[in-house]
Amino acid sequence: MPVKILMPALSPTMTEGTLAKWLVKEGDTVESGDVIAEIETDKATMEVEAVDEGKIGKILVSEGSEGVAVNEVIALLLEEGEDASALDGADTSAASTGGAAPAAEAPKQEESKSEAAPAKGQAPAAPVSGGDRVKASPLARRIAANEGVDLGKVEGSGPRGRVVKRDVEAAMLSKPADKAAASTPAAEKPAAAPQAPAASGWNPDLTGLPEYEEIPNSSMRKVIARRLTQSKQQVPHFYLTVDCELDNLLATRKQLNEKAGEGVKVSVNDFVIRAASIALKRVPAANAVWTDAAILQCKQQDISVAVAIEGGLITPVIRNAGGKGLAEISTEMKALAGKAREGKLKPEEFQGGTFSVSNLGMFGIKEFSAIINPPQGCILAVGAGEQRAVVKDGALAIATVMSCTLSVDHRVVDGAVGAEFMAEFKKLIEDPLSMLL
């Protein structure tokens, strides 16, 4: 019997993903541990390994298919001694989870009931020849229901003619043009204005835009947009900024790098991570996350560090940064950043985190305010170090100064606690030798 290859759940929050790329083709022999596909989740693009060995008998979900549900069968693997004839009549239903029967195996009686009275907000099942329901992904059905698109009139481009999100969006694009054509005389028809897909509820007026290139939003970009919008709307942000003098830190960094072993080069950002983790130790009330039931004050300083990658950003986590030295933080951060840019981070390497750091100083940004990443209570935005005029002992002097802004969730951290954290952070940055004790 052919072995089912399922869409894996690559993170606890993943319910569906995009099959970005197949790395094997039908007829290829694979062994356990071979990378067979790339899956785009709400976090990153990740590689999927074969669990069993055998020959790829049939690929059921094509490259680029979006909204593929977790545990849906994406391919069939022929075991030793099996040939293509074993595929005839092979079970391709989704694996059940939590003991619940998969939707495809629901009794016909229940299916007919759901067709007669669809739930509120759910796309009605449009019949096609043979009385079958329209094959559509859950995401496509949800978008169609919200936008009033008749799935029965949408041509599916997914596997086995399945209607996927891009098909519904294409139907939405054509709908305004059809209405305009019906109501406007041919001699008076204006140039059709482009319409943006409104799956997120955001449908701006694009009239008058110059020629443009349409770049489809990836799963990661959509999740970034949704979560940051929720954060700014639902999290009561306030901001605290301090200016830190860097001259002592830069001198200490130079000495450390001259004496460090081969391959170790401590950056200013490594000092920032170290200083933030020690400050969190000294002000544990700032190392907290929000839940509706309670504030969770974390006993370990797990620092999420924003890393820019193609198509978005991701925050790999330095676990227990408060218990690590500068060299260890530097080595681990370089490895995590490299894996992030290659799309090879494991879920445990970017999930969680109790406090975030976002550094745009390398781009020359003087100062900025970052958006909190819930459920964390704080994120530290780090600007560029630059020479500025300062007053020392009543006299004008020149110092290298770095502006840092803490964005704080007022539900979790009060103003006095945030100010106490920033005072400790500034003290550590300006006296870097204290970080080495």
Image (cartoon, rainbow, N blue to C red):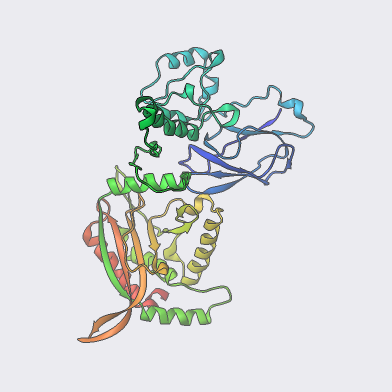
On the image, which quarter does residue 143 sit in? top left
Q: Does 276 sit above or below residue 347?
A: below
The N terminus: image quadrant: top right
**Image coords of residue 146 (percent x, y):** 37, 29
Please state which of residues 289 and 341 is positioned toward the viewer in this rendering: 341
Query: 5 left or right of 117?
Result: right
Which residue is drawn at the image coordinates 42% and 44% (left, top)? 222
Query: 313 left or right of 377?
Result: right
The C terminus: image quadrant: bottom left
On the image, which quarter does residue 322 sit in? bottom left
**Image coords of residue 197 (percent x, y):** 41, 37
Q: Does 226 sit above or below residue 130?
A: below
**Image coords of residue 194 (percent x, y):** 40, 39
Which residue is drawn at the image coordinates 57% and 37% (left, top)? 7
Which residue is drawn at the image coordinates 24% and 86% (left, top)? 396
Q: Does 417 sit above or below residue 131?
A: below
**Image coords of residue 289 (percent x, y):** 33, 51
Whether residue 317 is visible to the viewer of this picture, yes or no, is: no
Which residue is drawn at the image coordinates 32% and 48% (left, top)? 231
